Image (spheres, grey):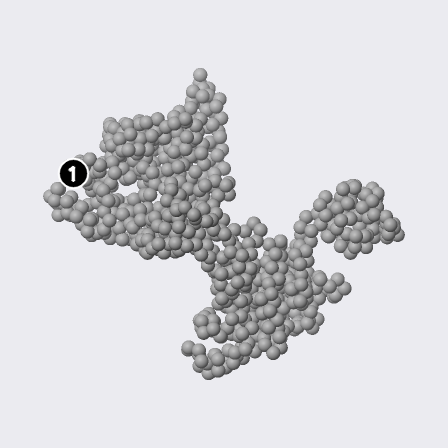
Amino acid sequence: MAGFDAVSRHAEELRAQLHHHNHRYYVLDDPEITDAEYDRLFRELQALETEHPELRTPDSPTQRVGGAPSERFASIEHRVRMLSIENAKDAQAMRAFDARIRKDLGADRIDYVAEPKLDGLAISLLYEDGVLTRGATRGDGSVGEDVSAQVRTIGAVPLRLQGEGWPRVLEVRGEVFLPIADFERLKARMLDAGQTPFKNPRNAAAGSLRQLDPAVTASRPLTMFCYGFGVVEGGDVGATHMDALTAFRGWGLRVSSESRLVTGIEGCLDYHQAIGERRDSLDYEIDGVVFKVNDLAAQEHLGFRARNPIWVIAYKYPPREEQTRVRAIEFQVGRTGAVTPVARLEPVDVAGVTVSNATLHNIDEVWRKDVRAGDTVIVRRAGDVIPEVVGVVESLRPPGTEPVSLPAQCPVCGSDVIRAEGEAVARCSGGLICAAQRKEALKHFASRRAMDIDGLGDKLIEQLVDENLVHDPADLYRLGVEDFAALERMGAKSARNLVEALERSRATTLARFIYAVGIREVGEATAGALAAHFGDLRPLMAARKSDFIRCGVAGIGPKTAESLFERLRARPEDAPAADRPLADWLAGLGIRGLGSDTAKRIAERYPDSAALLEAGEDGLVGGARSVVDGVGPVVAAHIVTFFAQPHNRAVIDKLLAPDVGGIHWPGPVASDASPNAEPAPLSGKTVVMTGTLSRSRDDIKQRLEALGAKVTGSVSGKTDYLLAGDDAGSKLDKAQALGVSVIDEQQLAILSQGAYVIQAG
């Protein structure tokens, strides 16, 4: 018996610890222990209760995820009705409310408790002797649904009250809701699973709480704020409403940190404005502010109407969802070429703003929601976010509507619209010529890390495009001093400086030019790798996807490939005769892993043993592998698609033509694409820079990468050289400690063997 008493005490201690840590985590957002430690305590209690079921209590943390799914919800009658709240839509209605209260109470000024009006689901929690015994929805105010099992799964709801002084019977009222970030994650998860997502956080909260299976509710990140009370027996909650909220916090119940005591109507209006200004930064949805007379005796004196208490009012914000009709669905082209469907709407006021357009995100969303021209739709606007179509009111759909199709050509420039496999967004392939993308393409082309055209800023580019002087980057090189001087805020001197900058930019590097033309997802490092690999632009333009991604033969592993090539190289005389099928010869070699089926796949790829030898082991091993650093299947597809577009090739030809752009760079450098060429001077070397150098870090980095070096930001045992300038700091100390070679710019010029000399000064 003594042993059982010890087990019972230990179980109680574990329950107390877990209740404490639940409160720290869900209510205070200030956990004291790790998730792993919490899980350990939970499992220990779970094991004790499994071994001794008589120790299991209704308030045990192990009971949060309830039992089997209910067939239906039982009805619960509220002993104190859960009434609705009177709404005020403007300051005038608020002033009228305050005037009535002051008149009824015979007071000059009234203290109110103000707090955000959560857009969730009202809930009632019943605690008896400090233990949660029941959870119920508001229902019709008189009768709600028993959701006790579901409520127990919400971490912010204590199963046992903390502290002391709570009434013997206490009914706490509040709002269950889903934080916005959690709602977005839940929405994405449902979309990934092929489920229809909830339309907004409020629907998500209601739908999650009203799941018949409590385990489903437990999987949803619901939380709760407590804001009031109903039945109170065997104790009290204080003399004021603010006293009650303070008591709730002490008993482990979660209360909004935005709750404030305000005085008079001006205090109410100031609070409403302040919360409205911060509304978009809150991590939960609100649709207004609730104001309650603070004094509980005054509340009792004021009493109730048939549907709502007299002593409380909700000052609402303009609604963020409205209903309107879709006039048309059009496609807009963004600065990155994204082709986005947009609904043109009959104008409607949403959250105080007239909305006539709403985004549909991408064609998949259009098809999923089945939005059509002529449909009646629900439009939502959150703060400064572009309004979106939440859903269609299908019962109001007129006959004869047609599903929307993705356009084959860009509505702006007529170029092909391409949607890469596995991507939701379709894009215009116009790139360098599409007017919708033109300004951004030119800004990128002229940027410091691309063609580095000093003085060609964003405002000037916008003028050039708006004045119809520039349609593609090559047009920049056709303009003279007079053309630039005629623009707004451009004098003759600035115009001459710009023309000189354009002239300087004609001499560049291949890597800079590849980066400048704006191939999607090709950054500086990838451009440098492409330049080093292909050596010149024309081989890159002619490359196919297979030139970037080496795909081997399915079923061939590294060991099998190694054994085969050892045999091929060691005894070339054993190569099959011209009249003998390669597959038969390979299968007859007796190499482990090289059966008849695999041999047939090799023979389908390579016509003879000579072609097989040329491909090498890397070309044989199964799976896709990148040939160029930073170029995977997706980027390779972007590169091939870009150069396949005739208009892009035409612009590049103009940029390189001596009588137009005249852009040039040093002749082809050694590359992996030329097997017999000498390697780049710094090929395979890792270089780190530190201190003050004679040129910008970006410039020197470009040059180092052109020499084949890999430039990193930190010194390690794998670093080959530390390029140190004046005032070198901790990197120099670390390099010396690790025995890394430290060089200056002059020594770098010697290392580069004349391929590129970094001049000092």
Camera-side residue of 444 and 650 = 650
User: Which x, y percent locates residue 230?
Assistant: 25, 33
Q: Quadrant of the N terminus?
A: top left
Please give the name of the residue rendered at 76% of the width and 42% of the height, measured from the top-left corner: 597
User: Which x, y percent locates residue 79?
Assistant: 25, 28
Please give the name of the residue rendered at 45% of the width and 21% of the height, measured from the top-left corner: 53
Q: Quadrant of residue 314?
A: top left
Q: What residue does disc 1 label? A: 302
Q: Amino acid at mark 1?
A: Leu
Please give the name of the residue rendered at 50% of the width and 82% of the height, measured from the top-left corner: 481
Figure check: 310 above or below 480: above
Task: Kindly tell me whether residue 307 is visible in this rendering.
Answer: yes
Q: Is residue 707 left or right of residue 68?
A: right
- The mark total stands at 1
User: Which x, y percent locates residue 493?
Assistant: 47, 82
Q: Is residue 563 left or right of residue 485?
A: right
User: Which x, y percent locates residue 353?
Assistant: 32, 55
Please give the name of the residue rendered at 67% of the width and 50% of the height, measured from the top-left corner: 624
Q: Residues within 10 Å of mark 1 (few under 14, many from 20)?
A: some
Instruction: Say which element carries label 1.
Output: helix
Q: Quadrant of the C terminus?
A: bottom right
Farthest residue, direction top: 1
Task: Kindly tell me whether residue 165 is visible in this rendering.
Answer: no
Figure check: 486 above or below 58: below
